[in-house]
């Protein structure tokens, strides 16, 4: 009595442009990604996605993007990095920082130093609660406050000639 391997039927996704995507590959990528993502930094995530896309060949980028949610541009950049000689790529140990010091978005305190003071002036007249308590509340909705903040920024610009 011999045994023979039977390949389980594969589920495929047919996209509107006629492209066929094998769901077992997508699910396999998703399982690997979800298992590894807590241990990966930004660079390692990009390089892993790129290596998977290269290994999958044609439509590899699209399969990785579909399975992981990583952007196609990020995967493409990772492929470019993988194609560079190792000596020209800045190697970074996983425990060290990836971005340059000061990289990334600046905090609101740095980029808009008057924002908190202006917001406080806008909300202070309608603030309720015990002035001694750290908990305060307002009767205005956040959408109304957002409109007032926008008007307070846009009107002065309009007055000095900005469209």
Image: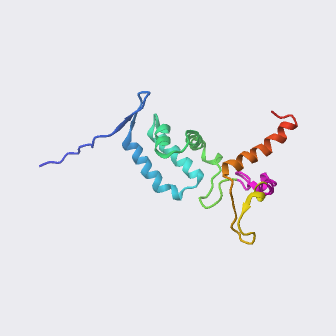
On the image, the x and y values in percent for residue 57 come to: 45, 36
**Furthest-right residue in this view:** 160
Q: Is residue 137 magenta?
A: no
Residue at screen point 46% across, 44% down: 67
Q: Residue 97 is drawn in which quadrant?
A: bottom right
Please state if 12 lies on the left or on the right of 44 as rendered. Answer: left
Q: How many marks?
A: 0
| Residue span colored magenta | 100-121
**Furthest-top residue in this view:** 17
Instruction: Give above or below for 114 relative to 81.
Output: below
Q: In this figure, which colouring scheme has been used for the structure?
A: rainbow
Q: Is residue 120 magenta?
A: yes
Please state if 153 lies on the left or on the right of 141 as rendered. Answer: right
Instruction: Give above or below for 133 relative to 144.
Output: below
On the image, the x and y values in percent for residue 11 come to: 33, 39
Q: Quadrant of the C terminus?
A: top right
Query: Which is more toward the observer, 129 or 9?
Result: 129
**Furthest-left residue in this view:** 1
Query: Which is more toward the observer, 128 or 134?
Result: 128
Residue at screen point 79% across, 52% down: 112
Residue at screen point 28% across, 40% down: 9
On the image, the x and y values in percent for residue 123 come to: 75, 56
């Amino acid at each position: 009595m011999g045994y023979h391997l039977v390949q389980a039927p594969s589920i495929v996704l047919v996209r509107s442009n006629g492209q066929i995507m094998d769901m077992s590959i997508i699910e396999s990528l998703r399982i690997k990604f979800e298992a590894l993502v807590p241990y990966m930094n930004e660079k390692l995530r990009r390089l892993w996605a790129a290596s998977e896309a290269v290994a999958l060949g044609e439509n590899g980028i699209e399969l990785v993007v579909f399975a992981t949610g990583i952007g196609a541009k990020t995967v493409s950049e990772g492929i470019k990095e993988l194609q560079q000689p190792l000596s020209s790529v800045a190697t970074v140990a996983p425990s060290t920082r990836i971005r340059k010091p000061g990289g990334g978005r600046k905090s609101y305190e740095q980029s808009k130093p008057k924002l908190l003071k202006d917001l406080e002036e806008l909300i202070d007249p309608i603030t309720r609660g015990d002035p001694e308590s750290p908990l305060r509340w307002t009767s205005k909705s956040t959408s109304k406050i957002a409109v007032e903040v926008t008007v307070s920024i846009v009107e002065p610009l309009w007055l000095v000639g900005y469209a």
